[in-house]
Amino acid sequence: MAESDKVISAVMKATGESYDRVSKLCSVAHETVDECVTDDISVVAPPLVIGRLGCPVLDRLLLRLGDGQWQLPESVDVTESELATTLVLPIETVARYPMIGRFGLLARCMDRLMIDDADAERSLVVLDAWLATFRPDADGRATPYPIWALPGRDAFEGWLLARLDILHKLGYAVRLANEDMDGVRGQQHMFVDGRRADILLRFTADCDKGAADDWLVLENKTTAVGIGALDQLALSVDWLRAEDRHGEVHGMLIADGLSLEVERGLRERRFDYQSMTALGYRRWVRQHSPLHPEPHFDATTINYPRNLSVRTLAPALR
């Protein structure tokens, strides 16, 4: 994955750095922001500020800025207790809805590119120039931040089924269900109403997340999701339970980001959630795809005083 030539040219002009240095750092910065946002970490690196709509920590930060008695610090990369004190929030809330600032982004980019600490200041200049490309123009119009899209669901499912050890490490001792052993298809099992389950897994041993012979229903989306994805997962779980097969039925949603409404619904139903980033799929795609991807998110601009461009991620819900 690579940053656009238009952005790279703008950063080169602003910094005087070479194409090679700018293209590498800007592409990694974009990938890092994508990974944070799709893993439900708000990015607060003005003029780029993005996160889930309704995030209580980001909302409180905007509220504090709006009262005119507080200014955004140079970076939000402080301890959870410091940020909780600053925003007057419980530390549990800050821990559940984390943030990353420009210094945190810089550290991740330098680590990924193996840049020496001696070049940190030089790298920060390039990062700041990249962030500045999202500054509003003279008319107040800002360039939406595009989150790079992932390949389709079939590609992800093939990737995951070849790496079930990822789920094993998360406490799920599972295998793909099959007709000979379980009487069902592991992929696209059809229920009596014609609905299909994405993937059905079977627990092979007692473990943290289930008992031997329990079931795990996976609902997979390679985009950010809204409440419809939770409904699809819940229906698949309920239909499998209605088939009265031996063992408990558990549910897991896998997506490239989700709304707070879905997060609450998952907790209520005791379903699990894993992001594409947390599973390692985004990084794997980055390492193996030579393609320049098209964005699958748009960001909506919130007009805010003092010329601070604040963007809050608006997922394309489906």
Image: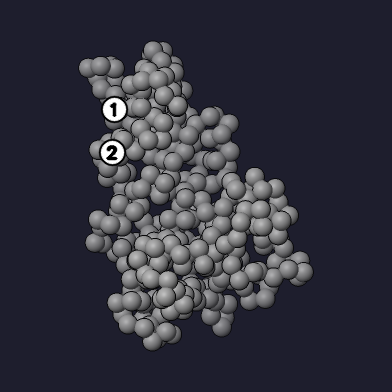
Q: Quadrant of residue 179?
A: top left
Disc number at residue 189? Answer: none
Q: Is residue 216 above or below residue 60?
A: above
How far separated are the C-alphas under marks 2 and 1? 11 Å
SS label for mark 1:
strand
Q: Is residue 313 above or below residue 260?
A: below
In this orientation, which residue lies closer to the viewer: 301 or 274? 274
Residue 316 locus on image (x, y percent): 47, 52
Q: At 47% across and 38% down in the image, what residue appears?
A: 273
Whether residue 154 is visible, yes or no, is: no
SS label for mark 2:
loop
The residue pinned by badge 1 equals 176
In this orientation, which residue lies closer to the viewer: 91 or 252? 91
Q: Amino acid at mark 2?
A: Arg
Mark 2 touches mark 1? (CB < 8 Å): no
Residue 267 locus on image (x, y percent): 56, 34
Q: Nearer the viewer, mark 2 or mark 1?
A: 2
In the rendered structure, which disc, 2 or 1, sits on the residue that comes first in sequence? 2
Q: Is residue 75 above or below residue 177?
A: below
Q: How many C-alpha atoms fall within 10 Å of the one at disc 2: few (<14), some, or many (≥20)?
A: few
The residue pinned by badge 2 equals 163
In this orientation, which residue lies closer to the viewer: 315 or 168? 168
Q: How many C-alpha atoms fall within 10 Å of the one at disc 1: few (<14), some, or many (≥20)?
A: some
Q: At 46% across and 52% down in the image, what residue appears?
A: 38
Q: At 40% across and 49% down in the image, what residue appears?
A: 277
- Describe residue 279's horizontal placement relative to residue 225 as left or right: left
- Describe residue 77's horizontal placement relative to residue 285 as left or right: right
Residue 254 locus on image (x, y percent): 41, 40
Q: Amino acid at mark 1?
A: Leu
